[in-house]
Structure formats: C-alpha cells, structure tokens
Image (spheres, grey):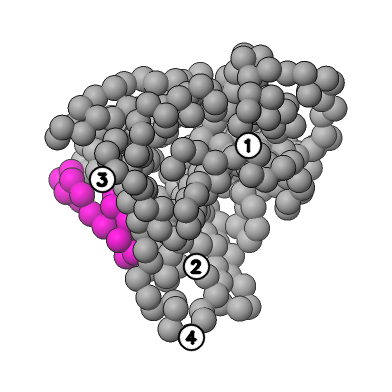
Amino acid sequence: MYQRAAFGRVRCRTRRVAAYACLPLFSGYLAFMAGGLRGIKALRQRVVMNAQQMTRDQYKTVGASSNRLLHAMLRVRDIDDSIGFYKACGMQVLSCSRRANGAATAFVGYGSMYDMEHFGLELAQASPSGDVSNQQINIGTGFQSVSISVPGALREFGRLRKDPDGYCVEFVDSQEPVGDPLHQLCFGVQDLDASVQFYSGILGMTQVEQRSENKEEGSILRYTQNRCKNGEATSIRLVASGHSITTGAGYDHLVISTPDVLQAACALDSAGVPLTLKPTVMFGLNITGIQDPD
C-alpha cells in the first residue's frame, strides 16, 4: 500500500517474485512511480484520526469501496520490442523513461497520461548485466494472461498470442466498447477459496462470477463500484491450479488505489494480515505491502 499527500489515487501492488507475492496499497489518485509515473501531483496529506482503532469491516465500508485496480508490472527483456507488441494491440505509450545504465520503464494502456479510469501495464527492462538481458524471463505459473476486449479483436489477432517475453495475451471480441479494453488479468492459484477470500474479504473486491472451465474452477472479481466511462473496470480471474504455484520473475506486482493507506494498513493489521512492508514513503507516496496466498 502506498499513500501520499497527493492528488487522488493510491497504489496497491502485488508482488510475485521468488516465493511470495507482495501487495501494496497507495492513497491518492493514480501516480505511477519512478521514471514514467503517470503524473504525480502533490496534495496535502490527510490526518487520520483514530486509525489504529479501525476494524477490517469498517475499512471495507469506509475505504475499500473506493479501491481501484491501477496497473500491473511485467518484467521484459527489450522495452522496444514489448512496446511495439502492445502498440500493435491498440494500446498507447503513456510514458517511457530510459536510464543511463540501460534500464527502462514504460507504461502502456488504452487511457491517457492522467487517466483515473483505465488500467495500465508497466513494462520494466532491467539494466543489462553480461548476457542476462538475453535470457528468457521465467514467467512461472502464477501470472497466466492479460485479456484484451476490443471490437474485431478475434479477426485481427486471433484468440491467443504471446508477447516477446512469452506472456499470454487473450483477445475477446466485442461489438462495441464494453468497459476497459484491458479487460482482465488471469492468475493461477493453489487454493481458490483462500484467494477469493483474500481479494474479496481483505481487499474489498466483489466476486462477480464463478465458473468451471475445462474442469478448472475459477472466479472473477472486480471493484464494481468504480467503473470506466465505457462500462466495467478491469477484473481479475483466479483459476484453481490444484498444485503449488511457481511465481517466476516476470510478473512483479499489482497496483491498487485506496482512499487512505494509513487507514488501510491499520485495518489490515488489526485483522491479522501481516504487513510485509510497513507504511513508508517512496517516490512521494506512502506505501505498505502485504502478501497474497500464493
């Protein structure tokens, strides 16, 4: 979790690196971090009264109802190859920052630079180190796909493609724009019930659908109270794998906004959710982190 005396949004990020997933929440409007942030604007930090006494149920009523999925970070080998792929899918480059050491970060999506409604992807290229930059990224089995829904998608792209690093991109045809074109993120989970409880009971998402696909149980969740101008906001789909998840080193985190990070952190802590990163300031934002079940 991140919070800032800042304009608008908050970030929550889920990190699946090595053997765990870190999920931070920010406060304020969306402010992307380091080299390619979508416009960080300073605001006065709100003083939270009696935050330590807020319960999880109170947080869901007062704070989580305003949460919103903001972006997910994917590690890539070549930022230009990745940008080219996602531009071909109809996305725009919202920002791109290249550093002297060879590292680079870009944000792509269907919104605009200061858009508060649309979900985005953060593409991060590491600084080259020997031949490491040429090695295939270990995606793992946790992050499964990004789903894009635009008119004529199946005709133009087919149902499934892979980006330059092997991330699966699923295309869904729509007769007209229905919600955010960056429609859905799919994650494999070991224990579906535990994961649904985490994202709904802890983070305040609504389970909007439960389905069985090819004998695999799954659930779809989203923040239903926050919509984009064309309809529903981006959702997440959790698919039961029935076995341990390998997180890999590709998908790095999921970012969620929340009205007040300090309130959220106190509520989560009081509910017995360990804070893997206690509230701190990073890039002008207050941030805290928790782990999801995988």
Residue 264 in sight here:
no
Which one is in front in this view, the residue at disc 1 or the one at disc 4? 1
Q: CA distance from mark 2 to mark 1?
A: 30 Å
Q: Which numbered disc covers residue 125? A: 2
Q: Which numbered disc covers residue 274? A: 1
Q: CA distance from mark 1 to mark 4?
A: 37 Å
29 and 192: which is toward the camera: 192
Query: SS for tag 2?
Result: strand
The magenta stretch spans which residues? 154-169
**Is residue 177 highlighted in magenta?**
no
Which of the two discs, 3 and 1, labels the residue nearer the N terminus? 3
Which of the two discs, 3 and 4, labels the residue nearer the N terminus? 4
Which of the two discs, 4 and 2, labels the residue nearer the N terminus? 2
* Left or right of 251, for residue 126: right
| Residue 71, percent from left and from top | 51, 44
User: Mark 3 — residue?
Assistant: 170
Q: Amino acid at mark 4?
A: Gly
Q: Amino acid at mark 1?
A: Pro
| Residue 78, percent from left and from top | 42, 71
Q: CA distance from mark 2 to mark 3?
A: 23 Å
Q: Is residue 93 above or below residue 229?
A: below
Query: SS for tag 3?
Result: strand
Q: Which numbered disc covers residue 130? A: 4
Query: SS for tag 4?
Result: loop
Which of the two discs, 1 and 4, labels the residue nearer the N terminus? 4
Query: SS for tag 1?
Result: loop
Q: Is residue 57 above or below residue 277?
A: above
- Identified at 40% across, 58% down, the residue is 248
Badge 2, how many Cα within 10 Å: few under 14, some, many 20+? many
- Identified at 55% across, 46% down, the residue is 22
Q: Amino acid at mark 3?
A: Glu
User: Looking at the rendering, in which quadrant would you find the N terminus?
Assistant: top right
